[in-house]
Image (cartoon, grey):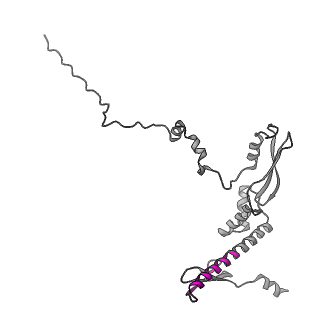
Amino acid sequence: MGHERKRRQKKRKFHGNFRTAKEKVSEGSISSEKLGRGLSDTLFNDDSETLSGNRIFDIEILMSIFSILSCPVCYNQELYLIEDSRLCLQSTLCLKCKNCSFTKGFTSTSKVNNLNIINLLFVFGMRIIDKGFSAGKKLFSMLNIPYPSKCTYRQHEIKLLHAASQAANNSMLESAKSIAECSNECGVSVDGTWQKRGYSSLNGCVLTISGDSGKILDIEVLSQYCRVCTKAEKT
């Protein structure tokens, strides 16, 4: 009789023990986990999610959205949007209902002291990046946004000039008073700058800076050309 084969017992697979046990990690997305836990309401109640600031809208898309809304008076979907007036970048819009007499007027941007702040911010931003009327007109033409006239643009520049001059004078007066309270004598340094790079600029300014506080005490604008004087000489 032949020898009986010995069967080798299969090794048991290792499924872990209390030393290797780990918490199961869900493979789903973080958003799905939050929804599963019922945390979706916290996303809408979070103050950081509050919308603010300015946006660029296509007016046709805005009109199409208002057209599918219901009128708060007659509850019919007969709302339409019209533009009553426009001042530079700010528009006065009106929402009306075709079925009843409901009307609701509003402006595209907020006002500060009855001033269209968006227009002043635009002109101020162009001055900050050292650009003028022509550069802004090219940009707005590409974006298909209505652009203010040159006269209106200059009026906003004058408003900004008066505000900047007043703020600068108040700051220099406060700096001089703070130094005078401590001592009647103080060291100063004088520095200057040009409107353009190089030595071809016709306009520049000279600054007097306190050596103790580092604040500007006085400023004087110098120019090699005066348009008013040139016209007077010709006449």
* Residue sitting nearer the eye, 168 or 234: 168
In this view of the protein, can residue 59 be seen by the observer? yes
Q: Give the residue displayed 74% in from the left and 47% down from the top.
A: 62
Q: Is residue 42 above or below residue 4?
A: below
Q: Is residue 214 above or below residue 70?
A: below
Q: How many marks?
A: 0
Q: Please provide the residue range marked out in magenta.
A: 166-193
**Residue 212 falls within the magenta-colored stretch:** no
**Residue 184 falls within the magenta-colored stretch:** yes
Q: Is residue 195 above or below residue 123?
A: below
Q: Quadrant of residue 148?
A: bottom right
Image location of residue 166, percent across then percent down: 70, 76
Residue extending farthest front: 181
* Residue sitting nearer the eye, 224 or 127: 127
In this view of the protein, can residue 137 be seen by the observer? no
Q: Give the residue displayed 80% in from the left and 54% down from the top.
A: 92
The quadrant the C terminus occupies is bottom right
